[in-house]
Image (cartoon, rainbow, N blue to C red):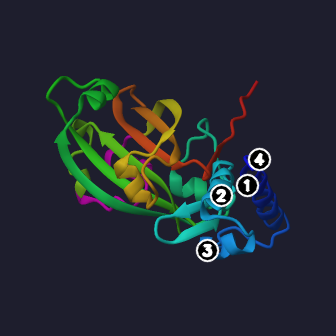
Amino acid sequence: MRDEAPRAVTAICRALQEQLEHGLLGPGSQLPAERKLSELFSTTRITLREALGQLEAQGLIYREERRGWFVSPPRLAYNPLVRSHFHAMVGEQGRVPATEVLAARLLPASAEICALLELPACSSALQIRRARRIDGRLVLYVEHYLNPQYFPGLLDFDLTLSLTDLYASQYGIRYGRVRFDMLPTALPVEAAAALKVAVGSPALRITRINRDQHGRLIDCDIEYWRHDALRVSVEVPE
């Protein structure tokens, strides 16, 4: 009896993977409701959810709170060595980008942000919180922290646009040296709420610390990507 549940999970995974491989369930399409899938496979909701969870861990399907399960679209190729920005990167791969500003304000910099931007204690930082979509799907929550010394009046601009372009056009600032840190993690509360998924869902956290063309530390980004939305692809030149 103890072997029946694992066998059922394996059978459900294989059946759904076959549907995916043959295109019967296309990218972005919604799976039948859990109740219907339980009836289809003659199993319990607990066993079904274990199977769906395994497929989610593989990046094949994803769940949206209060909406159900969907087939994951192709992952976005992300090359940290290429100087680009979100809208350009997504558009170049034939996808449709969109950005929503969740909040933008001047606030006291946390100890972490002071360390990342090498600010003295009790400093202020500009914080911009944004949610980003690819083909209508929420995939990225990002917090930008800027040294306000270099960006007076920035909050008056349209912050749904590329900050890279805004820096260049309004402040004559271009990115120079960049440092990346990437860490598989679980979504914290604010990121999960922005992406409309459960707290603790798997994610890739990318911290990017940016210097300008003069070597000054100007900003840092803390990004939370849905784990099935991205693949990091790097080609190192000779």
Q: Determine whether the residue tagged by mark 1 lies in a helix, strand or loop.
A: helix
Taking depth in this image into account, of 187 and 136 the one nearest to the observer is: 187
Q: Position of residue 121 (x, y in %)?
A: 17, 24
Identity, as a three-letter code, of the amino acid under mark 3: Arg
User: Badge 2, how many Cα within 10 Å: few under 14, some, many 20+?
Assistant: some
Which residue lies at the image location 32% right of the left edge and 62% below the top edge?
158
| Label 1 with label 2: CB-CB less than 8 Å | yes
Mark 4, Cα crowd under 10 Å, few <14 / some 14-19 / many 20+, is few
Mark closer to the chain start, 3 or 1: 1
- Which kind of residue does numbered mark 2 sit on? Thr
- The first of marks 2 and 4 along the sequence is 4
What amino acid is found at the position of numbered circle 1 in the picture? Val
In depth, the one of 197 and 94 nearer the eye is: 197
Q: Which residue is mark 4?
A: 3
Whether tag 4 and tag 3 are in contact, CB under 8 A, the answer is: no
Q: Is residue 157 above or below residue 29?
A: above
Camera-nearest label, 2 or 4: 4
The local secondary structure at tag 2 comes to helix
Label 2 – label 4 distance at C-alpha:
12 Å
What residue is shown with label 1? 9
